[in-house]
Amino acid sequence: MSEQGNQVARAAALIAGGAVIGAGLGLLFAPKTGAETRRDISRYARKAQVQTTRWGRAVKSSVKDMMDRKRMPVKNGHEEPELTAALN
């Protein structure tokens, strides 16, 4: 790896390490109890999972629509298919 690559990797490792230490200190000095913090993290994780599932379904549907449009013959040679995704 080049010297510049080594410096970038070192900087990324320092930033990641700092983030982990900061998150740990934030949890240590949080004004909530451990049970409340775990409950909040659990709720956030469930919401993120639901949103990710919705987004994945929207992308899958859009890709399927696009593939279906590509298979259909175009009547006018100037028409371009559009890709749209419904993000909720």
Image (cartoon, rainbow, N blue to C red):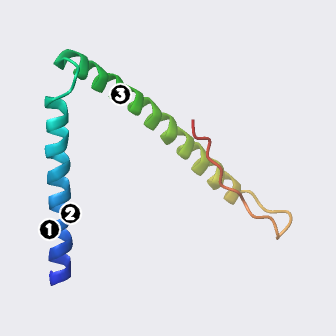
Q: In this view, does 88 lie to the left or right of 51?
A: right
* Location of mark 1 (residue): 10
Give the residue at x 20% y 15%. 35
Q: Report if the CB atoms under discs 2 and 3 are less than 8 Å apart.
A: no
Name the amino acid type tagged 2: Ala
N-terminal label among 2 and 3: 2
Residue 65: percent from the left, percent from the top? 65, 48
* Location of mark 2 (residue): 12
Residue 69: percent from the left, percent from the top? 70, 55
Q: How far apart, in angstroms, are the residues tagged by discs 1 and 2? A: 5 Å
Give the residue at x 13% y 30%. 28
Give the residue at x 16% y 51%. 18
Q: How far apart, in angstroms, are the residues tagged by discs 3 and 1? A: 31 Å
Name the amino acid type tagged 3: Tyr
> Compared with residue 35, is residue 50 higher up or lower down, i.e. above or below?
below
Dot 2: few (<14), some (14–19), or many (≥20) neighbours within 10 Å?
A: few
Name the amino acid type tagged 1: Arg
Q: How many labels does the image show?
A: 3
Residue ranking furthest to the right: 76
User: SS for tag 3?
Assistant: helix
Q: Report if the CB atoms under discs 1 and 2 are less than 8 Å apart.
A: yes
Depth order, front residue of 50/78: 50
Residue 79: percent from the left, percent from the top? 80, 64
Depth order, front residue of 67/15: 15
In the rendering, which numbered label is found on residue 44?
3
> Compared with residue 7, is residue 35 higher up or lower down, i.e. above or below?
above
User: SS for tag 1?
Assistant: helix
Q: Is residue 83 left or right of residue 13?
A: right
